Amino acid sequence: MEYGLIGATLKHSYSKLIHEQLYPCDYKLTELPTEAEAREFLEKRPFKAINVTIPYKQLVIPYCAVLDETAKAIGAVNTVVNVNGVLHGYNTDFDGFAFLAAAHGVEFSGRRVLILGTGGTSKTVTAVAKAAGAAQVLYASRTPGEGRISYEEALACGAQVVVNTSPAGMYPNNDALALDVAKMPGLEAVLDAVYNPFSTRLVQAGRAAGAKAAGGLEMLVAQAVYAAALFTGTEPQTGRIAPLAKAIFADRANISLIGMPSCGKTTIGRMLAKALGKTFVDLDAEIAKAAGKSIPDIFAEGGEAGFRDLEQQVTARFAKEGGQVLSCGGGVVLRGENVAALRQNGPVVFIDRPLELLCTGGGRPLSTDRAALAAMEQKRRPLYEAAADIRIPNNTDVFRRAAKAAEEALHAYFGT
């Protein structure tokens, strides 16, 4: 191959998409599950240039006859260029992480910085933080000792900035929360090198705590831009970083529609999916498919609690994927786990239809009459409003108008 990425698991990677937009190439994703396979690949050197990701950023170093000063100082390589059989190692993660921090106004000067994980990316974050004047850098690990504190100790360490460089929360293990940062007083910022999902549970927890918080998509794009410059011998196209990150987010994001039963989520969702080139998924239909029975029958046999358990499983399964419009059941917001799952990969849109225009019955076990519907709406409205990034009124019988309003609001949200 000419160009590509090596790592243990690459199914989540956006690197091919990014590089093939930056310059003409056929960028290959090469999974090397074992260290032996990685070493064999590096010995054969069947490439012009490659990027390197977890867990091989340190393993590649002995194979590089030439290391740039940044890679040498950090002790990790994420970019390798084959110059007439001689491997040159670079670290463009430094520039990528520096871009991410600057883009979100994260200050390191005078701050105590806590880094989760101790691999190659941890070393890169350390270098950026120290170069920016961090007062102290601490490390948390599942195996404390030798300069590493435990995750329990990390909660009381007094860090103002937390950076996750571990795989915790990465697809497909999206439910993992690297650290309960809500318990950390004085927290100012949370950054996560993980970019799939776009907003890990850690990032969501940071935002909920009132801190600046961001996932690793911009870091990924920025390091790729600097790597592409090394691949091609050209100047880095830094002006393309932010637009490309926005474009990837818009393309791969989910759009989750919430709201009362019969508010128009399914009809509007189908229209949005067609307009935006995304896959439409009706979560209630998927719940019925998973159970092998209708929703009224699920309620009849397992009660509401049984239905909610199944709803949570199905929501988690679909929410971790991307490029979808998800039409959610009316009660999906009753469990915080569902809301967190929906928010990890894109915006949540509240389709707000007036109570008097909502329908009763229709196979909906909890809204069989107007009184039940009114009580349900009163209970759920605050939850819809709290969960939503965007609110779309649906006040007429022409649902196309609401769909168009949602489409315009989403373009504004994504900046496309």
Image (cartoon, rainbow, N blue to C red):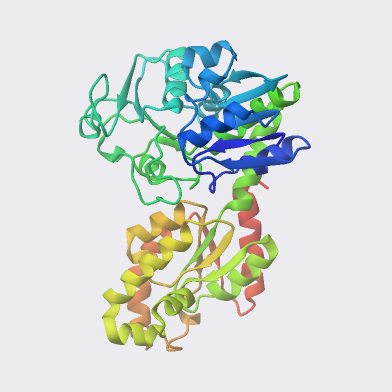
Seen in the picture, residue 252 relative to 115 is either above or below; the reply is below
The answer to whether 271 appears left or right of 319 in the picture is right
Q: Position of residue 390 (x, y in %)?
A: 52, 57
Occupied quadrant, residue 21:
top right
Q: Position of residue 220 (x, y in %)?
A: 57, 35
Q: How many marks?
A: 0
Residue in view at x 39 percent, y 54 percent: 340
Seen in the picture, residue 98 relative to 142 is either above or below; the reply is above
Occupied quadrant, residue 116:
top left
Residue in view at x 27 percent, y 81 percent: 303
Residue in view at x 56 percent, y 10 percent: 69
Q: Position of residue 376 (x, y in %)?
A: 34, 75
Residue in view at x 33 percent, y 76 percent: 307
Seen in the picture, residue 116 relative to 127 is either above or below; the reply is below
The answer to whether 80 appears left or right of 310 in the picture is right
Specify whether residue 404 is in view: yes
Q: Nearer the viewer, residue 66 or 190?
A: 66
The N terminus, quarter of image: top right
